[in-house]
């Protein structure tokens, strides 16, 4: 049975499901397989050949970590390209948008999270890691790439699942990204922490299995980060190559952190109306988190 994406599961639990509101329609959700949430990209929309062909993205959440994996034909250090300023075209940076805004609007508001995972790419920020308050920038011009998303599509690369199964059509892509510049690296932001790159065997041990979708690329890249470095709730994550020759997006949700409600005998009991309000707030918070978690678990089990 094809399970619905967590973002879709959360539609009833949250007032604003950003993905649906942005695209104006129900997300064509990805698939949960062995605790990973997958978005499988078109296998024939990588302009320039197999070295620029993304096949999919997957994300897994544990109690304290987020695992990310990308697969396709592009090595982590990129591939030789005579037309690029640095003679190399590689992966762009990964973005997380937890807002209910489009990608461009969230970028303009410095509201994105960004992860630079490719240490040799043309990201504007100087080191790999996780960044908050991010505004995105485009490096397609110095990577022999497309001047706009419209130019990419007008060149004949509009295929089914163009930005993965979660952002499947050109119409959806335009609604989310706009038709203008392909913003594919972190332009500015505040670094909040590092990532840990993972080997293929570590990814397999964590349950990653692109072969289940016949989507194993020659290059599979994965990393892990502390969950506390990111936001929580519904998100859209996405990545474009430095040239804009291919891109993929994935919709999902990260559970909110559990509220701290433990009160020991050493802590004076709250007194008065303010204290009672605090206790009530803690109780409501714990119940909401419990219901949130039960709902996701029930839906995934069904
Ligand atoms: Ca592709
Ligand atoms: Ca480059
Ligand atoms: Ca694509």
Image: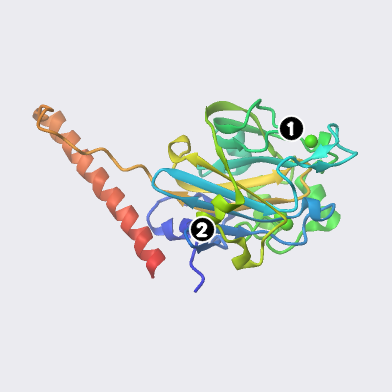
Q: Is residue 48 left or right of residue 181?
A: right
Residue occupying image coordinates x 13% and y 28%: 267
Q: Is residue 60 left or right of residue 238?
A: left
Give the image quadrant in which the ligand numbered 1 is located.
bottom right
User: According to the image, label 1 marks what residue?
Assistant: 122
Q: Is residue 74 left or right of residue 165?
A: right
Mark 1 surroundings: few (<14), some (14-19) or many (≥20) residues within 10 A: many
- Which residue in the rendered view is the most extreme toward the front? 201
Residue occupying image coordinates x 60% and y 47%: 199
Query: Residue 18 at what x, y percent from top left?
Result: 51, 49
Q: Nearer the viewer, residue 14 or 217?
A: 217
Mark 1 falls on what kind of element? loop
User: According to the image, label 2 marks what residue?
Assistant: 207
Query: Of marks 2 and 1, which one's residue comes earlier in the chain?
Result: 1
- The C terminus: image quadrant: bottom left
Query: Residue 232 at what x, y percent from top left?
Result: 44, 43
Q: Is residue 19 above or below residue 257?
A: below
Callout 2–callout 1 Cβ contact below 8 Å? no
Query: Residue 42 at what x, y percent from top left?
Result: 71, 61
């Amino acid at each position: 049975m094809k399970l619905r994406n967590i973002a879709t599961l959360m539609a009833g639990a949250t007032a604003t499901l950003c993905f649906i509101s942005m695209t104006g329609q129900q997300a064509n959700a990805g698939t949960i397989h062995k605790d990973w949430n997958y978005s499988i990209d078109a296998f024939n929309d990588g302009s320039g050949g197999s070295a620029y062909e993304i096949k999919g993205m997957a994300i897994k959440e544990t109690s304290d970590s987020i695992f990310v994996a990308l697969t396709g034909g592009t090595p982590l250090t990129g591939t030789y390209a005579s037309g690029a300023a640095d003679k190399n075209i590689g992966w762009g940076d990964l973005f997380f948008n937890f807002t209910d805004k489009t990608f461009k609007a969230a970028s303009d508001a410095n509201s994105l999270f960004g992860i630079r995972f490719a240490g040799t790419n043309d990201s504007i920020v100087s080191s790999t890691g996780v960044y908050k308050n991010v505004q995105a920038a485009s490096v397609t011009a110095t990577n022999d790439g497309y001047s706009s998303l419209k130019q990419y599509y007008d060149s004949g690369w509009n295929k089914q699942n163009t930005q993965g199964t979660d952002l499947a059509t050109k119409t959806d892509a335009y609604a989310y990204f706009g038709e203008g510049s392909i913003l594919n690296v972190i332009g500015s932001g505040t670094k909040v922490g590092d990532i840990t790159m993972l080997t293929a065997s570590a990814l397999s041990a964590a349950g990653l299995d692109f072969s289940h979708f016949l989507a194993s690329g020659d290059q599979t890249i994965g990393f892990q980060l502390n969950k506390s470095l990111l936001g929580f709730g519904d998100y859209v994550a996405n990545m474009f190559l430095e040239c804009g020759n291919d891109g993929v997006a994935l919709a999902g949700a990260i559970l909110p952190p559990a509220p701290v409600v433990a009160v020991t005998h050493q802590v004076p009991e709250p007194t008065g109306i303010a204290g009672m309000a605090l206790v009530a707030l803690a109780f409501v918070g714990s119940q909401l988190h419990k219901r949130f978690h039960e709902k996701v678990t029930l839906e995934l089990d069904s």
